[in-house]
Structures are given as C-alpha cells and as structure tokens.
Amino acid sequence: MGNPTLQAPEHLDARELHRVDTWWRAANYLSAGQIYLMGNPLLREPLRPEHVKPRLLGHWGTTPGLTFLYAHLNRAIRDRDLDMIYVTGPGHGGPGVVAAAWLEGTYSEIYPDVAQDEAGLQRLVTQFSFPGGIPSHAAPETPGSINEGGELGYSLAHAFGAAFDNPDLTVACVIGDGEAETGPLAASWHSNKFLDPARDGAVLPILHLNGYKIASPTVLARIPEDELVSLLRGYGYEPHLVSGSDPATMHQLFAATLDGCLDEIDRIRDRARRGGTERPRWPMIVLRTPKGWTGPDVVDGQQVEGTWRAHQIPLGDPRGDPDHLRMLEDWLRSYGPAELFESDGAPVREIREHNPHGNRRMSANPHTNGGLLLRGLRLPDFQEYGLPVPEPGNTTGEATQVLGAFLRDAMRLNESAANFRVFAPDENNSNRLGAVLDATSRAWMGESEPGDESLAPDGRVMEVLSEHTCQGWLEGYLLTGRHGFFSCYEAFAHLVDSMLNQHAKWLKVSTGLAWRQPIASLNYLLTSHVWRQDHNGFSHQDPGFIDHVMNKKAEIVRVYLPPDANTLLSVADHCLRSRDYINVIVAGKQPAAQYLDMDDAVVHCTKGIGIWDWASNDRDGEPDVVLACAGDVPTMETLAAVDWLRQRLPQLRIRVVNVVDLMRLQDPREHSHGLSDVEFDALFTSDKPVIFDYHGYPWLIHRLTYRRHNHDNIHVRGYKEEGTTTTPFDMCVLNEIDRFHLAIDVIDRVPGLGENAVYAREELTGKLIEHRRYVTTHGEDMPEIRDWKWS
C-alpha cells in the first residue's frame, strides 16, 4: 500500500495552506453557529444567553471532518478543473454542507434572503433545525446534495449510481465509520466490479474514521490497521491512510494523498479509454480524525473531543450554564471570525478565491440537480409489441416476456444517449426480461469463465444479489438526470422499504422547491408474485410492498395492477415517461390468459378502472352483484366465477369491474386519481353487494374505500398469509380468492336467488372438497382448472 503523504509533507505552499485553512475555519465556525446561534452571528458583541437557541439540535461530531474534506476537494477542483460532486454519508452532517454552499455563494443565489451579508448570516444560523427552517441533514433543500444521510448506508451506492454513464464526473463519497457497519453499505463496496472506467465516471470513497457512533466505538475504527487495509484491499480498493489531529500537518498530508489518488484515477481512465480491459484497483482514502475535531476539549470534567460525547451537542446548556456559555464563546472565537468575514458579513477574499467557479462548485454542479440534465427517453411505440387478442380470455401469453421486448428496443433507442439502465437483484431473466440482453450485456468488470453469458464492462443491465445496492444505484442514477427500471421478486421488494421511504420523502420535499427540477420516476416491476410462488413456498409469498407504498404522500406514489400483457405495456410506457413519482407495477411472469386487445387496453389503462361489458350481463338493469378484481390472478378467478355463475344461475345480473390504477378507488380528496362519489357509485352502485378479489392484503381496499356510500357492502378477498409449497390454484383456495369461494360469496350475499342457488352452493362446496383430494393425490390442479378458458 502506498501513501504519498510520507514523501511530500510540504505539499501545499504557504499561500495555498492559508487559503484552505481559512476556508475550513469559516466552514467550522458557520457549522457550530448553525447548531447554537440565533443572534450575534459575527460575535460583534459578547455572547449572551438570548443569542443561543433554546433547543439545541444537530450533530457536531462528524461535521469538521466533512468541512475539512470539502475544503481540500475545492482546491483540487480549482487546480484540475474537475467535474466533481460530494456525497456525504455520515448522519446529520447538514451544518457542514450548508456552510459550504453558503461560502461558495450557491446558497445565497438560490435563497436570496440568506445573502452573503450579516443579515443573511443571521438567517443562516437561525434557520438550522429551527421551526420553519431547514433540517439537520444534507436534505433536498441543500444545494449540491443527492444523499440525505439521515438514514445511513446508501451513500456509496448513490455515488456509483451517479458515476454510471457520466464519463467526466468524479464523485467524492464520504462514508462514516458508523455508516460502514450497515448492511447496504457493506454490499455497496462491490460496486467497483460494475464500474467501467472507459465509459463511466469515477468514485473516490473516503472512509472517515472518527471512532464513534452515538455512544459506542465503531468497528472499523477499532480493528488493527493491517486488518482494515486487508479488508479494503479485499474489496478491490487501494487504501491510502491519513491520520492525525494537528490542522497544519493534516492539511499537508491530506492534500498530497488526495492529489496522488486523483492522479491514479486519471491513469486508470486513460488506460481504459485507450483500450485497457482489466478491472482496476481504484484508490480510496481512509481519513482518521478526532470526533468533534476543533471543538470543546473537556466539558464538565469529561473528555469530549475525540469521544462519543462530541457526537451531537458538545455543550449542552449555554443558555442556562454560564460556564457553558463562556466555553461556547471561546470555541467560536477560536476560529477567528474577524479574520473570516468582511465588515458587512461577506466571506473574506481568501475564501472567495478558494471557491471553484460557476458549475464547478460542488454545491452548484448540475449533476446534483438532475432534472437540469434530464433528457426524455426515446421509446418505441408500445402498441407494436402487443399480443393479438381476437377474443377475451382465449389467448395465452407471458406479460413480462412481452414487456422485455419493449425494454430491449428502448435500450437500443437510447444507447447513444446512455441514459437508461435496467436493474435487478439477479432476477432479470427469472422475471422474463431476458430480451434486453439482445440489446446489451450485464455490466461486469469481474473475471469471466467459459460458459458465462452476456457479461461485458459496458453492459447496461445491472444485476447484483443485493436489493439495497440495486436501489441505491438506481436512485443515484435518477437523481443525476437519467432513467431506470427496477424488476424484483414481489416478496423481497420489502428489503428496500426504508430506502423507498427516504426517496419518497426526497421527492415530496424537492417537488416543493422551485429550483429543484423534476427527475425521472422510480419505476418498480414486482413480479414472481405471491399467487405464483407456489413452488418456492411461504417465504416467497408477500404482497405487502403495495401497502407500504400506499402510506406515502398521494402526490408521489402510483400503484398499477395490469391484468395482462397489453395493459402491462401501456402502463410501463406511461411510467417511463413520468416524472417525480414512485411507480409500482405488479404483473405476473407465467403464461396466463389475455383479455384486452391493444386498443381496449389503452382505453382501459387510461381510465384506470372500468366495467368489462363483455364479461357482464347487466345492461338491461342494475346488477344484482358487482364482481371487482385487481391483479392478474384475481382477474382470472373472478372471470372463472362469473363463467360458473352464469351457467348455473343465468338470471343473475353480474357486473365485472377491473381495476388497473389502485388509486382510482381512493377518495379524490385523498388522491388526485380518485373517482368522485358519483363516478364510484356509477361503477359499484350505492346499495348492491360488491365482491372484490384483490391481489394483496384485503384490508387495503377497505382503507381506500371507507368513505364510499356503499362501503358496508364491499366484501374483499385477498391474501391471508396462507399457503406454502403447493399448486397455483391451491394457493388461491387456501386464501379464499378462488372462483369457488367467490361464487359462494355471491350466492350468500344476493337475496332471492331461489332453490337453484341452494343446489349451486352445494356443488361449489363439493368442488372445494374435490379439489383438495385431487391436489393432495396428484400434485397438480384438476384439469378443469388448468384448462379453463373464458367462454
């Protein structure tokens, strides 16, 4: 392992050393000021209790390391004219990056009331973690941020996602040592096996070891140095260590190390772009500094700097404790504010000269406001990929396989733009999207062996067996102005529940910021779903991701359940064209009945919900019952129930309503897609029984429709946590979403059907018994179930 710092201890000349230190001291001053102050921002008078916020919120411990790195990266950007962004993983590092954006001038350009003067400084320090102000993270409100850091573990995946297809971009990614203990971050180290230096950008990971989490040591800070180096080298990196606490020495050591790493990145890029194909060993930096560096050393007789006590608020009560107030003033004055700011409050010339210019400022880099760079996808006409459906229910097809051909050609059309990738946790082919491999390979920088298929450094199919990493890559890709599509087994989408939470919150906030431009939507395809996981069993059966998504803000989320291939094509085309949404599409991959030709599919998906008149027989009056369905298997079982009932009880008037857009069920006061009460009653009636066969947990339909006039008559069947390894139809029977239970429900809830209904019900009960005996004897569904088609 090389460490160029040992050979070049005086890397910076006196002028450059002064500039970088001045900038760093200013950023630290502003960071501490944001945590503590609500008045006297330049310390033009002695500090008094009323100058201090009554509620002290924020985190000091990681901040001086973040500002130190920012100061040095700015010097490198200026010297090398780098296109660089800064991803900060350590939690709650917000004051440091806000201070940096203000010193660079970007903050005042976006928020004119936070100007570079004394009044702006007053606003800057007061607004932080203050009612009506800004949060303590590097949030959407923070210029230059694509990673909030409030929830740990995603920084490195975001950084690599940003670097994909950005050949001139360098992403400096700071990884906190507490963050490094998370599962998502641990998997993200392997992202270097998927980064192609010939066509992608570069990521410079910086592992910041300050030794502590909230109240205990961090693992990577407490293992022997040779073990740490071996771990990082085992991940495929070349680690360079910088350690210390004396600012002047650390400035020289880090500057030399940083320049050495950037030189190596240039060499790697040059070799790859001249035809080299080997996987490089990318440089990275391990920076070890005290937690709470430059802050209070000892407080109330206890060591603070360099310990877990510096994590949040080093001085707990400056308003009420005169000793704490004095220590706070001494701490703030130790940075020399009179040397950092002009008389009007603007940063001094040395600081302004240290900043890069224009879009080279990391807080103003357009990659961190991806909508500025977003180009619409070129998409083929999805209607040309549709399956012919001469009669409803008599054609068989595999919906996701049809979608795969559409995505393949979308990949081809956007190859030159290099702005579209598909992501899957080792499931692309399993999910029947293998056609995309006709247009591109899987991204792969690892070793290849005979028999491997579709692996290439420049592949655009991203597969790694980590849902967290796929999601993180995709988020970084979207946030920097590109498009993507994520397919996943339905049950295991839950692994990214929390990541979806954070992205939904990001979208919610950013859509309210005029300066943040819209980005491409986050598109999920959930397949290999609950009703066709009969072979994998209970562990693979869970449709609850929909429920999780539906808890998010209505203006952000959309959920679609297309019942066949043509509706899936229509929905996917719509989602790929959308902006600032989280779109969830649920569709099966197995051969299944096809119901709508392309023209009807487009109309049905545009409406989002509708009566299937070809399956209904209520044109001559109000229906006796409404059979509603959402999802491909529930749609099939609903139609099979209708078929059975119409043969046995021809006098029964049945209306079939199919739902593609789940939000159409919701009250329009809750979601913009919601049907009005008049529209809802026209479909579902105001007083007739509604038997609703639903793909997921039944309680969600009740939640969406609880305000409707006819809610008491809505009876929902869905997944009830029943089933294991069994047959496809038995899964339906065990959860009572099958045709026989549906038909029984209709007979039980529609009055006046007469004696024929009694005998029909007996027949249905017998069918359920016959089914159970058959599957446990033969291991497959009855022929009449396997071979059923809509008649």
Image (cartoon, rainbow, N blue to C red):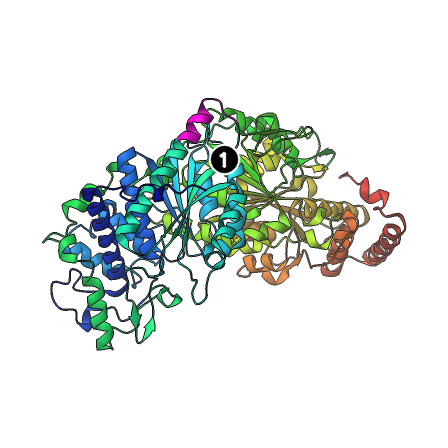
Q: Residues within 10 Å of mark 1 (few under 14, many from 20)?
A: many
Q: Is residue 97 visible?
A: no
* Rendered residue at 24%/57% (across/down): 30
Image quarter of the C terminus: top right
Specify the quadrant of the image occupied by residue 318.
Answer: bottom left
For residue 281, side relative to residue 10 (left or right) = right
* Rendered residue at 56%/26% (across/down): 409
Image location of residue 779, percent across then percent down:
86, 48
Specify the quadrant of the image occupied by residue 387.
Answer: top right
Image location of residue 622, percent across then percent down:
64, 51
Judged from the image, the secondary structure of the residue bearing numbered disc 1 is loop
Dominant SS in magenta: helix
Residue matched to label 1 = 195
Image location of residue 118, percent across then percent down:
14, 56
Q: Is residue 207 visible?
A: yes
Specify the quadrant of the image occupied by residue 75.
Answer: top left
For residue 389, side relative to residue 207 (left or right) = right
Find the magenta span and give its range.
267-277
Residue found at the very far front of the displayed protein: 7
| Amino acid type at mark 1 | Leu
For residue 236, side relative to residue 746 (left or right) = left
Residue found at the very far right of the displayed protein: 777
